Image (cartoon, rainbow, N blue to C red):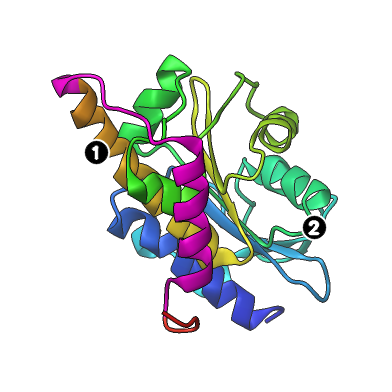
């Protein structure tokens, strides 16, 4: 089976979506790009998560041709492929309609930096992209145009897309997007939370990137 390791990673990334409460039924998808071949592995279309296996993941080239796999790829494949073609630093893409983040997307409203968790993980507000039609490359084009340096973007009237240097980085961004969106939603029911100053956002994000985790000095 072609790209066994990446297929396993993409499968595991997809399975984390329902476990994290980010998808319902068959919605949402995770993909990953192989740095050597440039091939992309993505979830099959319309398959329930509990029935999927690693071998069900579909391998595509960057033009959307099926290289390996018995099922049809996700209908969001054109979006994923557009992002990969225009963001060589990205090797993982996630799409969800997670509830609280999509509530902000429905309003076309970015998520402001009112929490240190947002400063740490995203380095700024989570932006909103303009409405784009589903089906071809329009959503991917708008993601690339509007996401900036953020690992996450809310697409107006649609949902969430996240990117990362690998599959799990993109999945983490999707989980964290919903987590901070939920907190901000509840905070806005109580009043208008204060935004952190830009210089504090930059300081917190830099410290998080440089210091957080076991691979860096505390």
Residue 97 vs residue 66: left or right? Answer: left
Can residue 63 be seen here? The reply is: yes
Residue at 46% x, 72% y: name it: 211
Residue receiving disc 2: 88
User: Dot 2: what SS?
Assistant: loop
106 and 76: which one is in front?
Answer: 106
The numbered mark at residue 7 is none
Is residue 155 depicted above or below 50 in this figure? above
Q: Earlier in the sequence, mark 1 or mark 2?
A: 2
Q: Residue furthest left?
A: 190
Q: Position of residue 14 (x, y in %)?
A: 46, 60
90 and 125: which one is in front?
Answer: 125
Q: Main secondary structure of the magenta part?
A: helix
Q: Are marks 1 and 2 in contact (CB under 8 Å)?
A: no
Q: Position of residue 44 (x, y in %)?
A: 57, 55
Residue 163 vs residue 208: left or right? Answer: right
Q: Is residue 102 magenta?
A: no
Q: Is residue 190 magenta?
A: yes
69 and 15: which one is in front?
Answer: 15
16 and 174: which one is in front?
Answer: 174
The numbered mark at residue 183 is 1
Q: Quadrant of the N terminus?
A: bottom right
Q: Which residues are magenta?
A: 189-213
Residue density around tag 1, few if under 14, some if 14–19, many if 20 or more, within 10 Å:
few
């Amino acid at each position: 089976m072609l790209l066994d390791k990446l297929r396993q990673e993409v499968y595991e990334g997809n399975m984390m979506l329902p476990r994290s409460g980010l998808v319902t039924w068959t919605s949402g998808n995770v993909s990953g790009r192989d740095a050597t071949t440039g091939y992309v592995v993505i979830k099959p279309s319309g398959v329930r998560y509990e029935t999927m296996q690693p071998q069900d993941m579909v391998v595509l080239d960057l033009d959307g041709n099926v290289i390996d796999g018995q099922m049809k790829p996700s209908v969001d494949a054109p979006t994923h492929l557009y992002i990969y073609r225009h963001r060589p630093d990205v090797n993982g893409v996630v799409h969800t309609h997670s509830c609280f983040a999509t509530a902000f997307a429905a309003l076309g409203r970015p998520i402001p930096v009112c929490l240190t968790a947002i400063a740490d993980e995203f380095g700024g507000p989570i932006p909103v992209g303009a409405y784009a039609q589903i089906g071809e490359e329009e959503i991917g084009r708008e993601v690339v145009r509007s996401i900036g340096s953020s690992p996450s973007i809310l697409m107006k009237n649609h949902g969430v897309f996240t990117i990362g240097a690998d599959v799990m980085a993109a999945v983490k961004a999707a989980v964290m997007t919903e987590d901070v969106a939920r907190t901000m939603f509840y905070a806005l029911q109580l009043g208008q939370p204060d935004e952190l100053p830009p210089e504090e956002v930059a300081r917190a994000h830099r410290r998080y990137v440089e210091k957080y985790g076991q691979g860096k000095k505390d």
